[in-house]
Image (cartoon, rainbow, N blue to C red):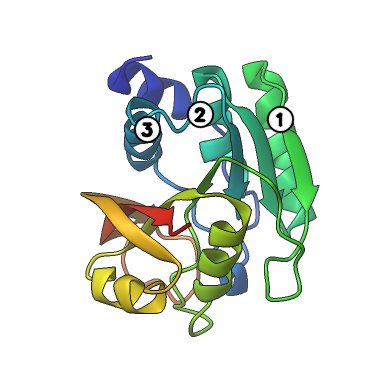
Amino acid sequence: MKLRQLEMCLQKVQGFHSPVADLEQYMTPATVAARLLHEAALAGDIEGMTVADLGCGTGMLSIGAAPLGATVIGVDIDEAALKIARKNAEAFGVDIEWLRMRIDENAEPLSADTVLMNPPFGAQKEHADRPFIDFALLTAPVCYGIFNKGSIPFLEAYTKNTAVITSKTAALLNIPKQFAFHTKEHLEIPVEIIRLERIS
């Protein structure tokens, strides 16, 4: 599937009805999700693979990975988000396994070939991304994540004994105003799509 075709398809994914600020529930824009998925597919990390989408929300990355030939597991703590994700999957005609679980140091790792994630940036809870990074690298040998621009030095230091960064792509998250503390109608957040490969 071509990048533009994938992006247009993902624009139909329904977002959160009542996003939770503490969980940093922001809809991953279709443009960024399509870019991540396209890069992962070109690298051979999607088709024929078991893909885990951590913090899947309403299913943007999961629903994009399924028609590209992946067996997909979507994971989130929020049952309301998973309910929307199930409806989205049904509307798209894709079969995805949805799991409700909290991703923390006590979570039992899954078994997958590739992890996709747009983890919390830590705006509401400091270091909220770290359990996702740890869990991702325990779950799969390859991880694609969306991180704040400038996160590479942190990631290199944090994963120095567990993974290496093999690619990065600049992108822009366009987030509409959805919480009371937002002062602008839209927030534009520079990010990087980063591929981490676990050290064997």
Residue 103 visible (yes or no):
yes
**Earlier sequence position, callout 1 versus callout 3:** 3
Where is residue 197 shown, x and y percent of the image? 40, 53
Q: Residue at x 48, y 61 (%)?
A: 178
User: Residue 96: which numbered mark, if any?
Assistant: 1
Q: Which residue is mark 2?
A: 64
Q: Relative to 180, say whether 117 is above or below.
A: above
Q: How many marks?
A: 3
Q: Which residue is mark 3?
A: 34
How far apart, in angstroms, are the residues tagged by discs 1 and 2?
A: 11 Å
User: Do the residues bearing badges 2 and 3 touch, measured as CB atoms within 8 Å?
Assistant: yes
- Neighbours of disc 1 within 10 Å: few (<14), some (14-19), many (20+): many
147 sits to left or right of 74: left
The one nearer the camera, 173 or 113, is 113
**Earlier sequence position, callout 2 versus callout 3:** 3
Where is residue 132 shown, x and y percent of the image? 56, 65
Q: Residue furthest bottom?
A: 126
- Neighbours of disc 3 within 10 Å: few (<14), some (14-19), many (20+): many
| Mark 1, secondary structure of its residue | loop
| Mark 2, secondary structure of its residue | helix
User: Residue 161: which numbered mark, if any?
Assistant: none
| Mark 3, secondary structure of its residue | helix
